[in-house]
Amino acid sequence: MRPSATLAMLKLYKRSDGALRYHEAWCNGGAITEHWGAVGEQGDSREHRLATGEDNEEGIVRVLQPAAEQGFAPIDQEDHAILLIEYAVD
């Protein structure tokens, strides 16, 4: 898991027990918010403090490291499904 130069949020996914599960984290006012669950469900979350001298990107990677070790990984943008909804507007 390698952060990009402008990492503000990182989403990891893993297919398990027939469901697509996610683990994500983002910067939130000097803390890191971690959120996880099954895609399509509300999921759970918790806040993590940044370690002394740690920047936001390092914090995000640290928080998601256990999930990465369990096989969660990013999905390339071109591999995401797209849902397009069109409707008429007056």
Image (cartoon, helix red, strand yellow):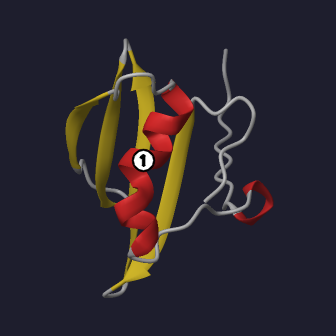
Which quadrant, please, contains the N terminus?
Answer: bottom right
Q: Is residue 60 left or right of residue 44?
A: right
Q: What residue lies at 46% left-to-right and 74% top-to-bottom?
A: 14
Instruction: Tell me: residue 23, above or below residue 19.
Output: above
Residue lying farthest to the front in this orientation: 53
Q: Quadrant of residue 88?
A: top right
Q: Is residue 1 left or right of residue 44?
A: right
Q: Is residue 74 left or right of residue 53?
A: right
Residue 24: horizontal and vertical position, in percent?
A: 42, 48
Residue 13: horizontal and vertical position, in percent?
A: 49, 65
Q: Indicate the amino acid at tag 1.
A: Arg
Which quadrant, please, contains the C terminus?
Answer: top right
Instruction: Tell me: residue 80, above or below residue 49.
Output: below
Q: Nearer the viewer, residue 34 or 77?
A: 34
Residue 71: horizontal and vertical position, in percent?
A: 46, 77
Q: Residues within 10 Å of mark 1 (few under 14, many from 20)?
A: some
Q: What residue lies at 52% left-to-right and 37% top-to-bottom?
A: 58
Q: Quadrant of residue 69?
A: bottom left
Residue lying farthest to the right in this orientation: 78
Residue 54: horizontal and vertical position, in percent?
A: 46, 27
Q: What residue lies at 25% left-to-right and 33% top-to-bottom?
A: 48
Q: What residue lies at 36% left-to-right and 23% top-to-bottom?
A: 52
> Label 1, on which residue?
62
Instruction: Tell me: residue 33, above or below residue 21.
Output: above
Mark 1: secondary structure: helix
Q: How many numbered marks are there?
A: 1
Q: Quadrant of residue 25?
A: top left
